[in-house]
Structure formats: structure tokens, C-alpha cells
Image (cartoon, helix red, strand yellow):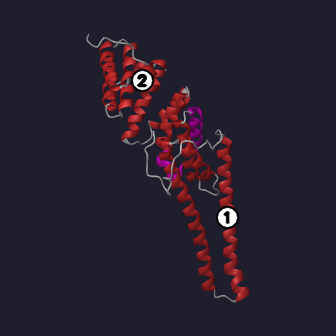
């Protein structure tokens, strides 16, 4: 679901599929502990800087007769140096998170190995830490560990994302899809409900429509799935080929089950044109396939 972006910090290094998993199963307590640790360390660093600045401004002039103007400049340089150091660390971690989101689409095991050291970084600001966890959720989703991916997304979404707020729609989409894959309709319901009140891009709107149709058809809420179905079919035409075909297939199933046979025939025919046979077979195995309908009638 993520869009590949350019890897940062030279993270285009070789991606070998043999890399072993590096991260344990997700535990919400780990995120809580890391956020708390980061805050404590940032506070401790701030106190140390405060003590150092006080020493520079008060102790050095008295002990060594340094000009107060020079002491003030040294104190300013100290504060600036610490601030720049932390800003660079957080910027690198944020860039790594964006790169790892792309790497997850190519080689999840390698991305997992590369994510581990960034998660071990200390004193990150909250929104950067949460970006790294978004990359972790994306990895788990790509690895088929959907319940874990949903749990990570839910934990991240409970917190303010700050400058990373733009990632909220993608996190909600990931939560909705992972919840559906993990047979958790309540998780999908929460995510889809939140998405309806969240500004989204066109691509995210198309993903939301596809997931909404899938959610409603899976739960047997066929009338809701078919509400304004011509408009949904038009939007589906803008989706990537596989998602376009699957959305038509699910709408066709809803039409068949509500005895709207003309709509079912048209939607089924479109699905057969757009879907690979393997996709339709998978849908049948998931009990989402459109039954055979005579499109010549």
C-alpha cells in the first residue's frame, strides 16, 4: 500500500533475500517504554545543557575572568551544538523510516534488519519514533503477519503524530486492510470510520473505496456495498488493475446476492476481464467470488 520512494542515507545498499528476521513480535509495552525513555533522556539532556550553560555564564567569568560577552557566546554555541546534533539525528531517523517504507516493498527481511538499529536509537522525538513503527507495521503487513501489523498501527494511531500527521491516512488504510486480512471486522470498522473524516489524496480515496466495499461484502452488508454502485464502479476504473478487478468482483457478488442480476452480470463480466484467473480463484477460496452469471442474457 505504500508508494516506493528514494532510499535515504545511501540505503540503496544491496538487498539480499537471505537476511534473517531481526525484530521480535510486537508488544505494545515496548512502544510505551521507548516513548517514555526518549522523553526522560531528552529531559536529562536538557537539564545537563542547562547546568553547562549556567557554568559557562556564571562560573567561567568568576573563576577565570573571562569576558561576559565571550561566556554568552560560548553558551549560545553549546546550546546550538546540542540542538543541531539532536535535529540531525532525528532527521536521519525520519529519512531512514521513509526509506524503509520503500524497502519493505522490495525485501521485507532486509528492511527488517536495517530497521532494528534505528529502533535502538535513543532520545528520538515522539513523531520520529512513531514513523519508525509505521515502517515496522508495513513490514509485518508485507510479511503476511496482519494481526501484528494491525496492532502496531492501532498503537501508533492512539498518539499525536505531530509533524508526521500526514501519515495518518496511510496508517488507517493499513489498519483497515490488515484487520480485514486478520478477520478483525471491528479494527476495520474503526479505521474506515476514521478515514471518512480524514482528508485523503485521490489514491488513498480509491484504496478506501475498495476496502469499504470489501468490508461490507465480507460482512454480508450487500445493500450498503451496492449503494451508488455505478459511482463506485467508475472510481474502481481508476484503481490499479488487480484492485479494480477485485472491486468489480465484490460488487458483483453483492448484486447477485441482492438479486440485481443485470448489475451482477455487468460487474461479473468486468471482473473476468480485469482479474487474472489466479485472483478469481483466490476470491473463491475466500468466499468472495462472484458466482457464474450468464452475461449473454
Q: Tell me if mark 2 has few (under 14), some (14-19) or many (20+) residues whose alpha carbon lies within 10 angstroms of its own.
A: few
Q: Position of residue 59 (x, y in %)?
A: 72, 81
Quarter holding residue 263 = top left
Whether residue 132 appears in this view of the structure is yes
Q: Position of residue 276 (x, y in %)?
A: 37, 25
In the picture, the quarter occupied by the N terminus is top left
Residue for point 69% across, 89% down: 65
Whether residue 226 appears in this view of the structure is no
Residue for point 43% across, 49% down: 5
Residue for point 56% across, 52% down: 127
The front one of 247 and 65 is 247
Extreme-right residue of the structure: 63
The front one of 116 and 251 is 116
Q: Tell me if mark 1 has few (under 14), some (14-19) or many (20+) residues whose alpha carbon lies within 10 angstroms of its own.
A: some
Left or right: 89 in relation to 38: left
The residue under label 1 is 45
Q: Which mark is residue 278?
A: 2
Can residue 156 be found in the magenta stretch?
yes
Q: Is residue 183 above or below residue 194?
A: above
Q: Is residue 121 above or below residue 57?
A: above
Q: Position of residue 244 (x, y in %)?
A: 36, 29
- Disc 1, SS: helix
Can residue 37 be found in the magenta stretch?
no
Between the C-alphas of marks 1 and 2, the distance is: 57 Å
Please report whichever mark, 1 or 2, sits nearer to the chain's N-terminal start. Answer: 1
Please name the predominant secondary structure of the magenta segment in the image. helix
Number of disc labels = 2
Give the residues in magenta. 145-167
Residue for point 57% across, 49% down: 114
In the picture, the quarter occupied by the C terminus is top left
Q: Position of residue 147 (x, y in %)?
A: 58, 32
Amino acid at each position: 500500500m505504500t508508494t516506493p520512494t528514494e532510499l535515504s542515507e545511501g540505503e540503496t545498499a544491496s538487498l539480499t533475500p537471505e537476511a534473517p528476521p531481526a525484530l521480535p513480535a510486537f508488544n505494545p509495552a515496548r512502544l510505551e517504554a521507548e516513548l517514555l525513555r526518549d522523553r526522560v533522556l531528552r529531559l536529562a539532556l536538557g537539564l545537563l545543557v542547562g547546568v553547562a550553560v549556567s557554568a559557562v555564564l556564571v562560573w567561567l567569568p568568576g573563576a577565570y575572568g573571562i569576558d561576559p560577552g565571550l561566556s554568552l557566546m560560548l553558551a549560545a554555541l553549546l546550546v546550538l551544538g546540542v540542538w543541531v546534533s539532536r535535529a540531525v539525528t532525528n532527521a536521519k531517523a525520519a529519512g531512514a523510516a521513509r526509506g524503509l517504507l520503500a524497502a519493505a516493498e522490495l525485501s521485507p527481511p532486509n528492511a527488517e534488519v536495517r530497521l532494528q538499529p534505528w529502533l535502538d536509537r535513543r532520545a528520538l522525538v515522539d513523531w520520529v519514533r512513531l514513523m519508525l513503527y509505521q515502517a515496522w507495521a508495513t513490514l509485518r503487513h508485507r510479511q503476511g503477519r496482519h494481526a501484528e501489523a494491525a496492532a502496531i498501527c492501532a498503537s501508533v494511531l492512539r498518539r499525536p503524530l505531530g509533524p508526521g500527521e500526514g501519515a495518518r491516512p496511510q496508517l488507517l488504510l493499513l489498519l483497515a486492510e490488515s484487520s480485514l486480512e486478520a478477520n478483525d471486522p471491528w479494527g476495520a470498522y474503526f479505521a474506515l470510520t476514521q478515514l471518512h473524516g480524514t482528508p485523503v489524496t485521490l489514491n488513498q480515496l480509491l484504496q478506501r473505496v475498495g476496502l469499504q466495499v470489501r468490508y461490507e461484502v465480507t460482512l454480508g452488508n450487500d445493500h450498503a456495498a451496492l449503494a451508488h454502485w455505478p459511482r463506485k464502479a467508475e472510481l474502481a476504473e481508476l484503481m490499479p488493475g488487480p484492485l479494480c478487478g477485485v472491486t468489480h468482483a465484490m460488487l458483483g457478488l453483492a448484486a447477485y446476492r441482492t438479486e440485481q442480476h443485470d448489475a451482477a452480470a455487468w460487474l461479473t463480466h468486468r471482473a473476468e476481464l480485469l482479474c487474472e484467473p489466479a485472483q478469481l480463484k483466490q476470491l473463491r477460496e475466500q468466499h468472495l467470488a462472484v458466482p457464474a452469471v450468464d452475461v449473454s442474457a
